[in-house]
Amino acid sequence: MIDQPFLQLLLLLGSSVAVVVLFQKLHIPSSLGYLLVGVLFGAHTPGPVIEVQQIREVAEFGIVFLLFTIGLSFSLPQIHALRGQVLGLGTGQVLLTTAVIGGASWWLGLPPATAFVIGAVFAQSSTTVISKQLAEQGEEHTRHGRLGVAMSVFQDVTAVPFVVIIPVLNVIDGDASVLFEELDWALATAVLDFLLVFFLGRWLLRPLFHAVAARRSAELFTLTVLFVSLLAAWTTSNLGLSMAFGAFLVGMMLGETEFRHQIESTIRPFRDVLIGLFFVSIGMLFDPSAIPQNWQWALVGVTAMLVSKTLLVALIVRLSGLDGLTAWRTGLLLAVGGEFGFALLAIALDAHILTNQHAQIVFTSVLFSMIVAPFLIRYNHALARLFVWQPKLAADPETYPVDAETTKHLRDHTIICGYGRIGQSVAHFLEEEMIPYVALDLDSSRVKAAHIAGEPVYYADSSERDILEAVGLDAAKLIVISYDDVVSAKKILHHVRALRPDLPVMVRTRDETHVEELRQAGATEVVPEVLEAGLMIAAHALLLLNVPFPRVVRRMQHQRAGRYRLLREFYRGEEIFSDDADLLVADGLRSVSISSGSCAVGKKLTELALEGVTVSSLVRQGRRESEPLDIVIAEDDVVVLFGAPGDLDRAERQLLG
């Protein structure tokens, strides 16, 4: 064991920095990195050992500040506003999972208190893992993505009663009356503490922070935040409850004030560092040598967790009125374990409710689920399709399903995939230009409202090949993918390129992260939502600063041309004589006619290795070929190239010899 405290701190910080940097590069949650650091410096692995008790005493404040920030995010008005779907679904999921897992554990012979703790730990899901993985695959703004993240965040609130209840469960000892007496006292104390913090918070906190903010001192503001949060934690601790509960309550009160965002920003550095230490201390409790003797039960635990949570979440989401596919996808997201489960596990260990063997099994089960989580979330759509027994959408007339009879008359029309705000905007412009269109969406109420209004909108999954065929893909002139779901967009592009490789497809995405990926998948143009919003804000800012309108328009056109290939692919004409330096070096199109003496005759364009240019098309006898790179060039063909003037000159000389 390392005896020097300062050396312990250096080893801990240095190892944490190295491991967290590595895990972030590998897109692995940082919490798992802290757990690994704890395992490495724990007493159960060879090498240097750091005293866990010293770490735990400091790390406990990480949970205090975590609950404090959760309280900031869920003030009483916000919880009241969420009393509908998210509150009902989130609470139902936690209660049902705790009851099912706890009941099964009790049936297997575990003590009731131990069974209850296992159910509570397994009921938690990792908001960090879920939100990060959804963002990486572009699903954070989908219906199942938003619902899954909202429910996982709300689990943190529903975990607060567990923080109150678990410490008193160690008094059971076979006497239920003692348990109920202790629980009644704990709940009564919790209510008293809530009323105390509520009234004092309403009367004192807002004036206090107004007075502190008037001093315009960041140092004083930080000290006040720390003092208030720790004072509330000390108060509940002296009343026999956990410190974290008091921090949560005062956070709720401060969440109603205008200082909420600044308080959260102030406390975040303390919270993040101390939460990292907390996970290090949890990792120190893990005994890797116990895996050989516990792995069977750990597998049973992780299987029970994944299966039960998937089924229960899918059931309650389906009963709430959402479609089956969304329900199963949400269930798969929330099936994984979460970091707050480790916090409940630590509280149970401090209260001596779990034996070391049970704790090791539960810890390993949650850890296994978090390792499996990225794969489960990445393939949630494919897995959910296995449980949806009707791959084609229901023929209920109230949902207005796709009917080939109603769409067979369409010719040269536009197919709009997704009828949200952007899809509707596109449709209205098309309607004004008298361009026929058909739209597909999976929101039945939206489809019904649009259909009643006489708009050609149908309830269908636009990522299905047969659906695209039913709405006249073979006769369509354009497809617009208006929703931000990269996985679904790539599936649509795959079907379109297989059936109509010549059909232009426009794709909307949130930012520029997936632009190149979608272009490689076959998108004709990708429009990043954030880019367009930024350009519009910049345009209005310039106009308000009295920049001439024509100059603003030119700047916006120049910025868009640099990002959208379609806006750059034009024939420059007389612009080549312009004195504008930007125009002289701008990318453009050039048509090269292949004469009889050209060295390119008889070769494929892939053999010529044209550098710096893109082959836009090949025209033969007045007809544009869809796959120009695989065609043997013949006399009188026209090769259309796109690139910078200098690169076009070199490519033209290479083609003509």
Image (spheres, rainbow, N blue to C red):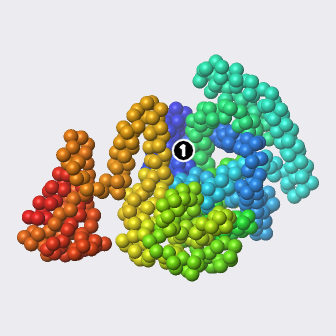
Check the image and name the residue furthest to the right: 177
- In the picture of the structure, the residue carrying the numbered disc 1 is 49
Q: Is residue 636 above or below residue 251?
A: below
The amino acid pointed to by label 1 is: Val
- Residue 6, percent across and down? 52, 32
Q: Nearer the viewer, residue 39 or 301?
A: 301
Q: Nearer the viewer, residue 314 or 144?
A: 144
- Residue 256, percent across and down? 73, 36
- Residue 115, percent across and down? 76, 61
Q: Residue at x 18, y 71 (%)?
A: 637
Q: Nearer the viewer, residue 117 or 245?
A: 245
The number of numbered badges drawn on the structure is 1
Q: Residue at x 85, y 42 (%)?
A: 191
Q: Is residue 575 above or below residue 501?
A: above
Q: Is residue 386 left or right of residue 646?
A: right
- Residue 377, percent across and down? 56, 63
Check the image and name the residue furthest to the bottom: 405
Residue 620 visible = yes
Q: Is residue 151 left or right of residue 242?
A: left
